[in-house]
Amino acid sequence: MNKPELVKYIESLEAPKQFPEFKAGDTITVDYSIKEGNKTRTQSFTGIVLQIKGAGNTKTFTVRKISGNIGVERIFPFASPNIERIEINKRGAVRRARIFYLRNLRGKKAKIKESRS
């Protein structure tokens, strides 16, 4: 077996966690575990999905929230064992797959319309 076939074989062995379907513009809450010394705790990160990137085991998604007037973005890999669950809070109606224009908007202009479906 050459290297690409071996990587595909190993990826097929792992059973990925099942998360709900979401897309850019949706507001989600990601619960992930953090290891501090010998203790682990769960922390939530609630924000708007800016993009979903990649495929297979390298698929990631970027979530942005405003914390104390500062924009905070975090990139999560779908295959991360630290993600415990993903909850969809709101479905957003956006016309693009990557909504980086949201970085330059503040206040009411940064609001995303809720999807009617």
Image: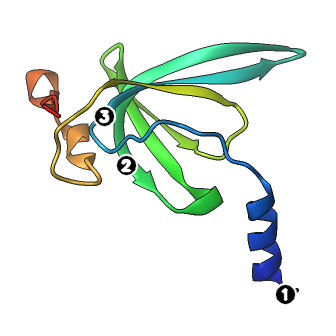
Q: Label 1's element?
A: loop
Direction from residue 112 to residue 85 in the image, left or right: right
Q: Eyeballing the image, is 7 above or below 21?
A: below
Front residue (pair 66, 92): 92
Q: Mark 1 sits on what residue?
A: 2
Label 1 and label 2: CA atoms lie apart by 33 Å
Q: Position of residue 98 (x, y in %)?
A: 29, 52
Q: Mark 2 sits on what residue?
A: 51
Q: Earlier in the sequence, mark 1 or mark 2?
A: 1
Dot 3 and dot 1 residues touching (CB under 8 Å): no
Q: Of the residues shown, which amino acid type is indicated by label 1? A: Asn
Q: Mark 3 sits on what residue?
A: 26
Q: The N terminus appears in which quarter of the rendering?
A: bottom right
Direction from residue 61 to residue 9 in the image, left or right: right
Circle count: 3
Picture residue at 59% right of the left edge, 45% below the top: 78
Q: Label 3's element?
A: loop
Dot 1 and dot 2 residues touching (CB under 8 Å): no
Q: Dot 1 surroundings within 10 Å: few (below 14), some, or many (20 or more)?
A: few
Picture residue at 68% right of the left edge, 41% below the top: 80
Picture residue at 72% right of the left edge, 12% below the top: 41
Q: Label 2's element?
A: strand
Which quarter of the figure has residue 90? top left
Q: Nearer the viewer, mark 3 or mark 2?
A: 3
Q: Dot 2 surroundings within 10 Å: few (below 14), some, or many (20 or more)?
A: some
Q: Position of residue 117 (x, y in %)?
A: 17, 34
Q: Of the residues shown, which amino acid type is indicated by label 3? A: Asp
